[in-house]
Image (cartoon, helix red, strand yellow):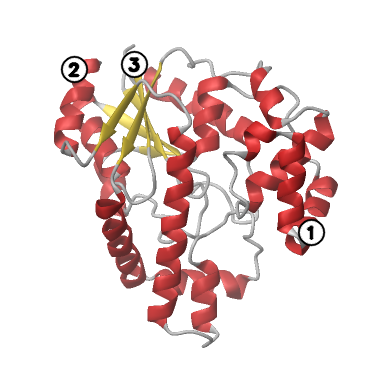
Amino acid sequence: MGKIFSIFGPTGLGKSSLAIELAKKINGEIIGVDSRQVYKGIPIGTAQPNSSQLNEVPHHLIGFKNLNEKISAGEYMKLIDKKIDQILLKNKSPILCGGTGLYFKTLKEGIFEGSHTNEEIRTRLENEYDNDKQAIFEKLQKIDTNYSKIVHINNKKRLVRALEVFETTGKTMSENFDSSTLKSRYVDDYYFIYLTMHNDLLHPRIYKRIKIMIEDGMVDEVEKITRSKIDISHIDYIGFKELTSFLDKEISIDEAIERIFIRSRQYAKRQKKWFNANNFDEVFSLDDISSNDIVDKFIQIN
């Protein structure tokens, strides 16, 4: 078995297309590493591979969870291991591709045993966050200074999770990562690659993709969710709030698009900050090299 290419980078970069081209050349199948793309019913807003891409190369862990379900990083790591097993049994090459920093860290460093969810504590912390997110953030800064440096105050999910872990285990998130014992069976085989792009090039790509999402039916997708009355706050679907406001005739579609663009840029900035604080086996800037050339370099590495 060769290296298991694990491709990460910010939203809108073109990771999926690059992974597909790589898969074609090395007889590969792609495993999604994205906390949003795991959900059914929201393929447009979470930029899941489209039907054409899915037909080109087999994809795994895409659109398999119900909207009301939650999944932890530890559970996801186990699912990835299982999918790698299945792909290798077919004598094919697994390729990981995504943008969720926590999943990257879990695959690279493992996760502490006993990690679990306490719904009562989480609900209380979420309410505290909604009432005063600054106070919650300052609490994390006092408890875990290092982790607070890579968690944005607006990232409710990760901020609440860090405090929940502290309350349930008595250890900070940093301490738990340092003492992690539960690791992927393939941790020594992963070859972590970080793709980056200057904002002058990335931001127009993000805006163009949002426009395409709207044309492809993102408004209808959001309307179906609102009619179902399913709580999707745990997903952090960028665009849901904005398009709900449009559907309620509170803002125009152009204003909704602009707000989605701003949030998407902010998300990409947080992703970059997270990834820049971690080590990768290779870093490629798409400012300097084409995706085809990068694929060729991958093949040489393998």
- For label 3, the SS is loop
Whether residue 267 is situated above or below residue 221 in the rendered picture: above
Residue under numbered circle 2: 300
Residue 207 sits in quarter: bottom left
Residue under numbered circle 1: 127
- In terms of depth relative to the viewer, which is nearer, 96 or 110? 110
Q: How many marks?
A: 3
**x and y, in percent, of residue 242 in the image:** 51, 73
Relative placement, left or right, of 42 versus 55 is right
**x and y, in percent, of residue 142 in the image:** 76, 38
Cα–Cα gap, marks 3 and 1:
44 Å
Callout 2 crowding tier (Cα within 10 Å): few <14, some 14–19, many ≥20? few
Q: Nearer the viewer, mark 1 or mark 2?
A: 1
Relative placement, left or right, of 132 versus 301 is right
Residue under numbered circle 3: 3
Q: Which mark is residue 244?
A: none
Which quarter of the image is occupied by the C terminus?
top left
Cα–Cα gap, marks 2 and 3:
11 Å
Quick one: label 3 or label 1, which is nearer the N terminus?
Answer: 3
- For label 2, the SS is helix
- Contact, CB < 8 Å: mark 3 with mark 1? no
**x and y, in percent, of residue 165 in the image:** 76, 35
Relative placement, left or right, of 160 versus 194 is right
Task: Identify the residue at image location x=44%, y=76%.
Answer: 256
Task: Identify the residue at image location x=48%, y=59%.
Answer: 42
**Residue type, numbered disc 2:** Gln
Task: Identify the residue at image location x=57%, y=56%.
Answer: 236
Residue 66 in sight from this viewpoint:
yes
Task: Identify the residue at image location x=49%, y=81%.
Answer: 246
Callout 3 crowding tier (Cα within 10 Å): few <14, some 14–19, many ≥20? some
